[in-house]
Image: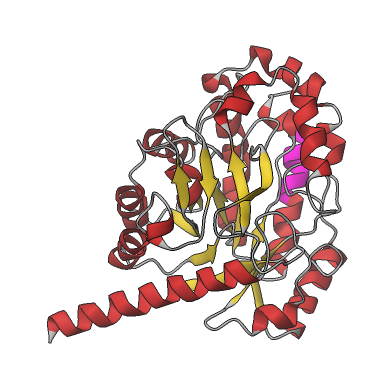
Amino acid sequence: MKMTFRWYGAKDDSIPLQYIRQIPGIGGVVSAVYDVPVGEVWPRERVRGLKNEVEGSGLGLEVIESVNVHEDIKLAAPARDRYIENYIKTLKNLAEIGIKCVCYNFMPVFDWTRTDLFKPLKDGSSAMFYDKRVIDKITDPSKMVRAMRRGSNGFSLPGWEPERLNRVGELFQAYQTVDEEGLRAALGYFLKAVIPYCERYDIKMAIHPDDPPWRIFGLPRIVKDERDIALLLELADSPYNGVTLCSGSLGASPANDIPAMIRKFGKAGRIHFAHVRNVLRQDDGSLCETSHLSSDGSLDLYDIMKAYHDVGFDGYMRPDHGRNIWDEKCRPGYGLYDRALGIAYLNGLDEAIKKGEKSDVI
């Protein structure tokens, strides 16, 4: 596996590249060009500049997270072909600088949903939190958008682009006639258009699961579980059509067996990117993000890392959302300290699994 770390660029990240370079076992960063409007082509000079900046620090850049999909593509609107054409041009520009994997999602309106970005925890840290009771009472999602912006610590929120969410009411109206079958058909249309170019450019598409993996505000969700992933892989039967398997997103549902999914889709070569984190599920359907340590959450990280080992996973991996610890001022979920601890933990598990297997053979 190739261990990576998400980075938002020198202008919008609290963490310098030289700090990331000092994390033991790090192989590179995952980044993007964040100020190009969704649906427009990423200019060659911008992606080349990003690549040079990262490599100049001694790190690699082979994964982009994310090239976001315009809502008109998800809605099968008349303008979707123009936005798909732009997406293909962006893929070409990324391939030219050596990008091998693109993470994206197909979630309507919200890329992820939380009710609290810095919920205090018992140990004095804080973490992102999803309170089902709060969600169930929301009748105007635009109020949640404003609350998230106020609570973001002054940082932009990935997947919550202002140009899109400023018209959240209009988007909800547009999705009233879209069900899961329609959204899946729109994803199939998109994949059938872009995957042939991915094969030509040698760049793999890795869809991120819904976060959390169930319907919210009546919006359709189509990457919730094992069945959904199997269906989307059939939409374009190519090794370039794959998954970003996020243990925290999928693991929010107790019905999802993450190690089993890793073995099924990893053995088939369809997991191109792994987000590995823990989450603490609550009886009422709420969830809290935690440290990566197995005992702090509802997921067994040893079992997850063992599954990746068993299928011979050699793709890209990163720790996912971390807590806010040691009074760090950072973007919600994306501080340095707890994610660096996450990398150390994941690398420690990986080393122990490999050495344990060797001792068993001896």
Q: Is residue 38 visible?
A: no
Name the residue at 46% across, 29% down: 284
Q: Is residue 54 highlighted in magenta?
A: no
Which segment is the magenta one? 81-88
| 20 to the left or right of 297 | right
Name the residue at 65% across, 60% down: 324
Q: Main secondary structure of the magenta part?
A: helix
Q: Is residue 1 above or below residue 258?
A: below
Tell me where residue 54 appears, x and y as whole percent.
74, 77
| Quarter of the image that includes the C terminus | bottom left
Quadrant of residue 1 in the image?
A: bottom left
Q: Is residue 342 above or below residue 102?
A: below
Camera-nearest residue between 292 and 313: 292
Tell me where residue 157 appears, x and y as whole percent.
76, 48
| 248 to the left or right of 146 | left
Tell me where residue 310 appears, x and y as whole percent.
28, 65
Q: Is residue 352 above or below residue 137?
A: below
